[in-house]
Image (tube, coloured by chain):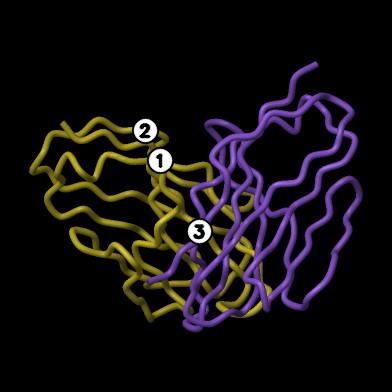
């Protein structure tokens, strides 16, 4: 593994189904983030984790949950998917949560909810 | 509310210079980032400004004026591979990144 990996690459999901998007990083970064990217809008933060064992809500957390049991993994769960959750989802990480720490992004998961 | 404004699309010629502007209104300021995103790919880091002035990195430079809530990204000697979207993001008082919608840059031969 080099950097950040996400799985699956893409998924078509029926509305009402539960889905977990996986994210793993091997850079030993403390902070991790989940964003969604929709056409014409900037990246919007869903949830974040400043360090293992802690999580926080971003700008658009409703309908999503996360956990951070260890440093490397940060899964995002949609408990009951709805069509408005159709988007491209990016996981990102940074060495620390603040200041000039740049965020490194995974390749993204393209999710379609029908 | 928080707001980041960038032009939606710009067109430039190979070999030329282009300036992409970004204006922001955020709750607090803890730095401004520029990222590049090719179609279908993840954003990648280009530059970071926290103090006023110009930061130069090869063909790319980024400028910040905190009093004006303004930044620009300057790309010199444009190459076809520079065709991409350029994202401006500001770290707010909660240390979260607020993102602009991005500027799609089209390079013509």
Point out the frontmost of discs 2 and 3: 3
- Chain letter matching colour yellow: A
**Which residue matches tag 1?**
A109
Give SS at disc 3.
Answer: strand
Residue behind mark 2: A10
Mark 1–mark 3 distance (CA, rounded to whole Å) = 19 Å
Q: Residues within 10 Å of mark 3 (few under 14, many from 20)?
A: many
Q: Is residue B98 left or right of residue A14?
A: right
Q: Which residue is mark 3?
A: B99
Which chain is indicated by disc 2?
A
Mark 1 vs 2: CB contact within 8 A: yes
Q: On screen, A31 above or below A38?
A: below
Same chain? Circles 2 and 3: no
Q: Chain of mark 1?
A: A
Q: Which residue: 55% across, 66% down?
A: B24
Classify A83 as above or below B54: above
């Amino acid at each position: 593994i080099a950097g950040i990996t996400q799985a699956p690459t893409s998924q078509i999901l029926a509305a009402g189904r539960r889905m977990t998007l996986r994210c793993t990083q091997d850079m030993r970064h403390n902070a991790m983030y989940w964003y969604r990217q929709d056409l014409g809008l900037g990246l919007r933060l869903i949830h974040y984790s400043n360090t293992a064992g802690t999580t926080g809500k971003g700008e658009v957390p409703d309908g999503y949950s996360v956990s951070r049991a260890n440093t490397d993994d940060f899964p995002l769960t949609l408990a009951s998917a709805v069509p408005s959750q159709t988007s491209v989802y990016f996981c990102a990480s940074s060495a620390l949560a603040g200041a000039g720490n740049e965020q490194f992004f995974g390749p993204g998961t393209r999710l379609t909810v029908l | 509310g928080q707001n980041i404004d960038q032009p939606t699309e710009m067109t430039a010629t190979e070999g030329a210079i282009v300036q992409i502007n970004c204006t922001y209104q955020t709750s607090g300021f803890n730095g401004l980032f520029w990222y590049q995103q090719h179609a279908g790919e993840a954003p990648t880091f280009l530059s970071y400004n926290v103090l006023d002035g110009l930061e130069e990195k090869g063909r790319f430079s980024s400028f910040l004026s905190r009093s004006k809530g303004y930044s620009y990204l300057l790309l010199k000697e444009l190459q076809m591979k520079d065709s991409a979207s350029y994202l401006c993001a500001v770290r707010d008082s909660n240390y979260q990144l607020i993102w602009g919608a991005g500027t799609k840059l089209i390079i013509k031969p």
